[in-house]
Structures are given as structure tokens and as C-alpha cells.
Amino acid sequence: QVQLVESGGGVVEPGRSLRLSCAASGFTFRSYAMHWVRQAPGKGLEWVAVISTDGSNQYYADSVKGRFTISRDNSKNTLYLQMNSLTPEDAVVYYCARHRGAQLVAAYFDYWGQGTLVTVAS
Amino acid sequence: QSALTQPRSMSGSPGQSVTISCTGTSSDVGGYDYVSWYQQHPAKAPKLMIFDVTKRPSGVPDRFSGSKSGNTASLTISGLQAEDEADYFCFSYAGSYTWVFGGGTKLTVL
């Protein structure tokens, strides 16, 4: 069955960096675009970034553009999110989600991971 | 990339119907038929309920339906059941390869 397992969350000081990973299994990873979505505890969801199947195209929310980088390693069935210059506003749960939709613009998510919590504190 | 507008909370009794609205602009909800809806129970990952405005994934009860009129999309839940109590989020393409969620609606089954 499809599984997405995030890791890499933890406590980091403001201004520092962190890399999240999402290990995929149960499907042909290289055939699906992948997204990161985040959520403050008890708050709403925020779309963060998307990467195309081969990694050649990435798009970001304005709130993270220039600070975060989404990437993937199809040989390892793993999605990444490199987060730099972290602020307290980035201290939320991060989910990876599998893209569905015939085109990238027609995105919706049929599988989600369980999330990994990032805490930004000095 | 402003969040889509949803009512913060709604409630209904078992067996009743509720309709959750999701209002955007002509640049997002109104401009594309790429609206999806997600159900989220506490401490759980979101679950897809509706995609492409009206389509229901296999396994989702037909009590759940979606629609759109102008810049507002709606999720209707008929025959409310206790397990429908959850948070619901809409999601839409917003142009220029960006996407936006609604602020979320907390549904209480009385």
C-alpha cells in the first residue's frame, strides 16, 4: 500500500537550516509529482512547494520562496525539503503529499504522510 | 496567495445536511475547475473527499458532494453522521503554479 513517511523535524534555532525527508513506498515514485504542505498546530493548511516527476520543475509559495528548496531522488524514492533561514513562523507540521491530477495545475492530493514537526526556538 | 474564505465553524444534527462554502476570486476558485476538499480529524493527516470540484474518490460516501458557482465552491454533506465531525479544508489552483487552501471549517455534529 502507498506509504509516505516524513522525517527530519526537530528543534532548530532561528536563522538555521533543516532538511526534511519523505520516504515513499507502495507506488512508482518517479511517476508522481510531489508536494509539501504545512500546518501550524490547530491551524489551517498552507501549500508550500511542488516538484515535477523528474525534478526539473519546482514551484514555491511566496512565504518560502528563496529560503526553501524542494528536491527528490527517484533512485531512493525520497522527497526532500531544504529549509534555510528559519523563522518562528516556519515552526509547524510539514506533510508530504502525492500529487494527482492530469496536469500539474490540476493538483490534488490522494495520499499524505503523517507529518513531521519543526520547532524554531532559541 | 491569500487563503480562501471558509466559515470557521458549522454544526448540524445527525441526518441533516450542511453545506460548507469556500470563497475565492476569479484568479483561483472562479478561474479553474481545480477545487478539492479535505477532511481532517484531530491529529490525523488530511483525507481527500472531493476533487475537480465535483468528483468523489472511490471509498468516499456519496453523502459528500461538491459544486461551484462563480468564485465560491461548496461541499455538501447529506445525512450527517457522527464520524463526519472534523475540520474541512478547500484547496484551489491560484495561477502561476501556486495553490491555496481555505482557512478551514470546524464541523460539529450535535
Image (cartoon, helix red, strand yellow):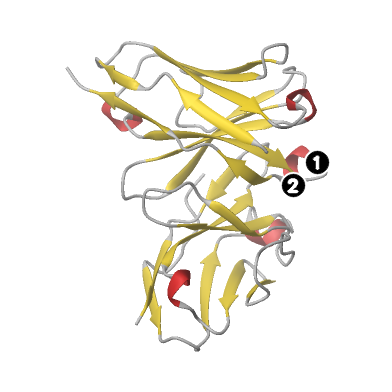
Q: Left or right of A42: which side holds B71?
A: right
Give the position of the C terminus of chain B as an image quadrant.
bottom left
Between A61 and A37, the residue placed more toward the observer is A37
- Disc 2 on helix, strand or loop? helix
Q: Left or right of B19: which side holds A58?
A: right
The residue sitting at 37% across, 66% down in the picture is B8
* Residue topped by disc 2: A106
Q: Left or right of B9: which side holds A78?
A: right
Amino acid, disc 2: Ala
The residue sitting at 62% across, 16% down in the picture is A71
Check the residue under mark 1 and report the chain it is in. A
Label 2 with label 1: CB-CB less than 8 Å: yes
Question: Quarter of the image holding residue A57?
Answer: top right
Q: Residue furthest front?
A: A1
- Callout 2 and callout 1 share a chain: yes
* Residue topped by disc 1: A103
Few, some or many residues within 10 Å of mark 2 (<14, 14–19, 20+): many
Between B10 and B92, the residue placed more toward the observer is B10
Q: Residue furthest left?
A: A122
- Give the Cα distance between marks 2 and 1: 5 Å
Question: Quarter of the image holding residue A119?
Answer: top left
- In this figure, what is the number of numbered marks? 2
Disc number for residue A45: none
Between B8 and A30, the residue placed more toward the observer is A30
Q: Is residue A14 above or below residue B92?
A: above
Check the residue under mark 2 and report the chain it is in. A
Measured as percent of width and height from the top left, residue B13 is found at: 41, 87
Measured as percent of width and height from the top left, residue A5 is found at: 52, 29
